[in-house]
Amino acid sequence: MKIGITCHPTYGGSGIVATEIGMELAQRGHEIHLITYANPIRLAHETPGVFYHEVEVSSYPLFQYPPYSLALATRMAEVATQVGLDLVHVHYAIPHSVSALLASQMLGNRLPFITTLHGTDVTLVGSDPSYLPITRFAIENSPAVTCISEHLREETRRVFGVNRAIEVIPNFVNKGIYRRRANPELRSLYATPDEKLVAHLSNFRPVKRILDCVRIFARLTAKVPSRLLMIGDGPDRTPAEGLARQLGVGDRVQFVGERKDVASLLGISDLLLLPSQMESFGLAALEAMACGAIPITTRVGGLPEVVTDGLDGFLFEPGDINAMAQAAETVFLSPGREQSMRAAGRRTAVTRFSSDDVIGTYLSLYERILDIY
Ligand code: GMT
């Protein structure tokens, strides 16, 4: 198949999932055409079968806000005609599903498209009155809509008041890439062999509560020799750096910025702190589990669909930093428990969220949509 994929190319779960779907499909012999304004962050260099089409947005003195959604719709229609796309799969409703709807109409409704909702496009941005009616319109008029968790499907129905068919297709990991790695050389950059390596991975937005990561870690490292690896970047980085210094753990917390080698970094980590206020899925938790790093996270959104409390990770109420620090300490002081939880996390990732299965589910959805068109 020739598949167009549109996503936000910045550091965020929806863009990562979209890029990973593209790379997985290309490996299975499909031709992938990424249509965005920049190369997505997770795109590996030289991925055969993946082509990139830049969306250029011309500015003009009259425009206070250049109309990206229109430039995107134009580019989608152009690429679809030039290469003969079978369908377009857009990730994150705003503005992508609206652009896809326009592109499809420009082509006489002969370009099927699928909208995958990821979370804040429903719970935060989508529910904003400036965007809600048009997002609802695009969701109602997408030939197929998918959500990455049951929780998000319920939220979509509640926020938009739609009762159309929405398929839940969860996020996934490639079990060959996301796995535990003995990489003493890489690990020695961040921790000594007798220290535990704790990671956090996100875009450091307020919803991720990264200051809680620092507070949890400060309590933990007072009891268990450890280091904190902060992977990503975003608005709360500076406050988190300041807090680490204030709590006297500045020299034990390393901010490594946005990284492409997430699988390698999680593969040497022992635990992941993800104390988010909200996660519709929590891709970072799943990637950590596949790598044998135990997720300590929150009982919100779709996270309970991914993590089973006490078996392959821990779930707490957002803000309960004492309980999260206590759980980390308890598991690190019980090597048997630590090992069994690591193994359980890997098992969950491989048996329930493997790319082998989930990509197959996307492909059968594509085929069903193409049959209707
Ligand atoms: O979490 C973010 O801020 C980024 C956001 C996005 O859309 O890029 O992530 C959402 O999609 C991810 C991939 O499906 C999910 O794993 C995240 O849980 C979800 N984030 C939220 O719901 C806050």
Image (cartoon, rainbow, N blue to C red):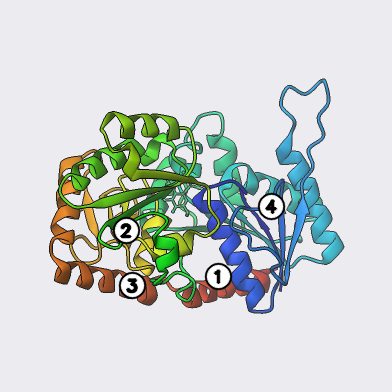
Residues under numbered marks 3 and 2 in contact, where contact means CB atoms less than 8 Å apart: no
The three-letter amino acid code for the residue at tag 3 is: Arg
N-terminal label among 4 and 2: 4
Residues under numbered marks 4 and 2 in contact, where contact means CB atoms less than 8 Å apart: no
Residue that carries the numbered disc 4 in the rendered image: 39
The three-letter amino acid code for the residue at tag 4 is: Asn
Q: For numbered disc 2, what is the local secondary structure? A: loop
Vertical comparison of 180 with 235: above or below: below
Vertical comparison of 200 with 166: above or below: above
Q: For numbered disc 4, what is the local secondary structure? A: loop
Residue that carries the numbered disc 1 in the rendered image: 362
Residue 321 in the figure: left or right of residue 348: left
**Gap in angstroms between the C-alphas marked 2 and 1:** 42 Å
**Gap in angstroms between the C-alphas marked 4 and 1:** 23 Å
Q: Which mark is residue 346?
A: 3
Residue at left offset 83%, top offset 26%: 60
N-terminal label among 4 and 3: 4
Q: Which mark is residue 288?
A: none
Q: Residues within 10 Å of mark 1 (few under 14, many from 20)?
A: some
The three-letter amino acid code for the residue at tag 1 is: Tyr
